[in-house]
Image: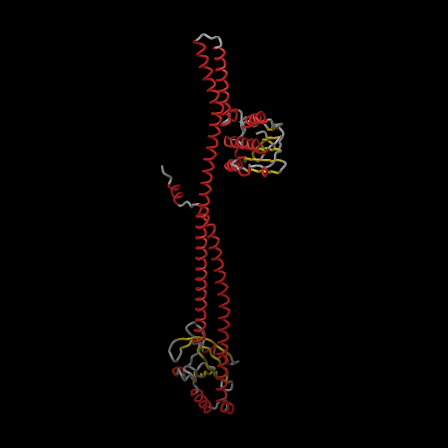
Amino acid sequence: MINRGQLWRDRFALSYGQKVFLLATVPLVLAVAAISLVVANQSRQLAETEIRELETQLIEAKKAELKNYLSLARTAIGPIYGNALPDDEDAKLEVTQILSAMIYGQDGYFFVYDYGGNNLVSPRQTFLIGENWSGLTDRNGVPVTDKIIETARAGGYHTFDWTKPSTGETARFVTYQIGLQDWQWALGTGIFIDDVLATVAAARANTEARIRQTFLQIALITIAALLAVFITGILLNLRERKLADSKLKALTERIFDTQEEERGRVARELHDSISQILIGIRYTLELARKRVSTKDARAEGDIDKGIDGLTNAIHEVRRISADLRPGVLDDLGLGPALKSLMEDFKARTGTDTHFETVVFRNRLDKDAKIALYRIAQEALTNVERHAEASEVSLEVFGHRRGATLRIQDNGTGIAGDRRAGGLGLRNMQERIDQLGGTLRVLSTDQGTTIEASVPLSHMLPPQTKATSKSAPTTDRKTA
């Protein structure tokens, strides 16, 4: 049955390039978003502070203007009010007439309420005159008449919503009033500040527009950055792909060269040894046949020589086969295979050798054994061809981190021979890279050390069911 969850996961699985792109862009987008929010918040706070200061300054200017208007009214009625008695009705009438005539601008006027709440003067809204307006509130429930009378006793300001005479619309109204204590009157004037509020609202709208513009600029910069990251990623991807293709091509050519070199070596081995031996056996057997036909007594000796030749041919085939894939590596493990390799090297070159190992009870997996054996084989081939060494040592051991193969010689060093430009070291590096291990090469004019290590993941678990409780624990483990 098809697993739908797996199908969805496969459908939406991200490629390596997409993961890299997200890894590069998501932090950038998050950082830009955080910066944008901080910038917007700071901009709003700063603009709000400035707008409030502007509003305060404009309103204070209006209030100062109201004081000036009221000073003019006080000057106009001063001689009459100052010389009148509290019950002088004629003087009161004359004062109300003077104040009713004092209008300014489109909506400016003076108003008078007695302390009982009766309106005495309201030239632009005459319907108020003669009526008692105690308890009057505006549309927001703010007291009007009672508050005007209260603040007039000590001289003060009051703000509320009021109908604007010129338009008939409700607007914010700021009043300033003083008390004429002898007559128990509240004399005041007011000014509508809808223009101030409109200016403040325009300033806020301008601030929001600037913030939106800032967001837009940040968004454009972010998009440009993302495009730059995307284009850079594409270019890098193309470059890496081209580089990978060139490396793959070089590797393929190297593999072909190695295969051809190995085929050439095997062909030379077959031609120089097996072919020559078989030709000798043929001539020997032909001679033996002739002598048998003539009943020559030397025919038996020729047959013995042919048998010896076949024996040598069998040994040569085994030797070539062992070079290609030593059977002892699969049968007995890495240690005996390396020991046999060192013995063959010593017999072939006459070089003093030293071999040291622990007992590898086939604890290494197949890939690790083959890789370490081929590395040792390649290293000894390089020593034989180029190093001019008189002593070679090989050491292989297991430890807590895996297994290590170390080969040392006292030759001329890599810098003094041709190994640096050959395929040997590159083949070693590629073999160890496939296992996730490490290859270290230390070379001086006193000799060369090659150390190849494979990780613990290539060590198989012990095959024995029980282990000795008294076995000591050391860094080099029996693997």
> What x and y, as percent, mark residue 82?
52, 90
Q: Residue furthest left?
A: 1
Task: Tell me the quarter of the image containing the C terminus.
Answer: top right
Q: Quadrant of residue 121?
A: bottom left
Q: Quadrant of residue 355?
A: top right
The correct choice, above or below, for 189 with respect to 440 in the image is below
Frontmost residue, 281 versus 437? 281
The correct choice, above or below, for 387 with respect to 246 in the image is above
Frontmost residue, 349 versus 163? 349
> What x and y, as percent, mark residue 147?
48, 77
Task: Tell me the quarter of the image containing the N terminus.
Answer: top left
The correct choice, above or below, for 291 with respect to 440 in the image is above
Q: Residue at x 43, y 55 (%)?
A: 227
- Horizontally, residue 449 falls left or right of residue 285, namely right
- Horizontally, residue 12 falls left or right of residue 86, namely left
Q: Residue at x 49, y 27 (%)?
A: 325
Q: Is residue 435 visible?
A: no
Q: How many marks?
A: 0
> What x and y, as percent, mark residue 266?
48, 28
